[in-house]
Each structure stands twice: as C-alpha cells, then as structure tokens.
Image: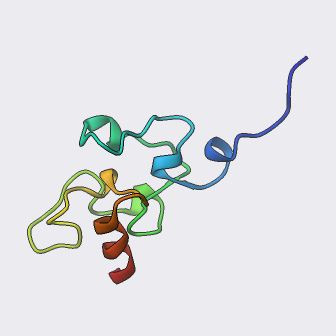
Amino acid sequence: SSSNALNPNVHYPHIRQLCGVHPFDPLAKSAGNAKHCEKCYCFVCDDLVSKCEHWKISLAGDVGGSRGPHCHAHNEDESWMQLKERV
C-alpha cells in the first residue's frame, strides 16, 4: 500500500543540512552542499537560500567571508553557530 505521509525535510521549509532532496556533507566543502531545493533555508541568514547573498561565494569583509560560503554552514559547527548569533 502507498503512504500519504509527507517528509518535512522535503515538503516544508528546512535548514539546508536537513534537506531530504539534496544530501549535505558537513565535513566536505564540496559543490554538492550548494545544491538546494526551493524549501531550503540558509542556516546563517535564517532565510530562503534564494535570498542569501553569500550562498555560493564569500567576499572579503562580508558576513561569512572568513568561513566561506553559507552553503557549508550547519548547526554542528561552533564557528557557524557563533556567526548566526551575530547576524
């Protein structure tokens, strides 16, 4: 029998690291982390990835510049947690 259950990490807004569509690797700074679905939120900006100015690039002097693009941010890394608190 088929199930009508919805996956909250696919059907509802979620932080990128929990995306049920695109796998996230917290240890690798790979291009795969930049992939996102339309429901993904930037962990740092707390807004849709489509609105994050630092998703794929980090510019010197900008928020996240010293840590790299926000696509690699997740809640298991203390430095990203600290940045999130300051934004």
Residue at 11% x, 74% y is 61
Image quadrant in which the C terminus is located: bottom left
Q: In the figure, 64 relative to 72: above or below?
A: below
- Where does residue 21 sit, x and y in percent of width and height? 54, 35
Q: Residue furthest left?
A: 60
Is 3 placed left or right of 78 in the picture?
A: right
Q: In the figure, 26 relative to 31: above or below?
A: below
- Where does residue 18 sit, x and y in percent of width and height? 53, 47
Q: Residue furthest top?
A: 1
Image quadrant in which the N terminus is located: top right
Foreground: 60 or 77? 77
Q: In the figure, 22 relative to 2: above or below?
A: below
- Where does residue 37 sit, x and y in percent of width and height? 50, 42
Q: Residue furthest right?
A: 1
Is 74 placed left or right of 83 in the picture?
A: right
Q: Quadrant of residue 65?
A: bottom left
Residue at 44% x, 43% y is 36
Residue at 47% x, 35% y is 22
- Where does residue 84 sit, x and y in percent of width and height? 37, 73
Is 19 placed left or right of 83 in the picture?
A: right
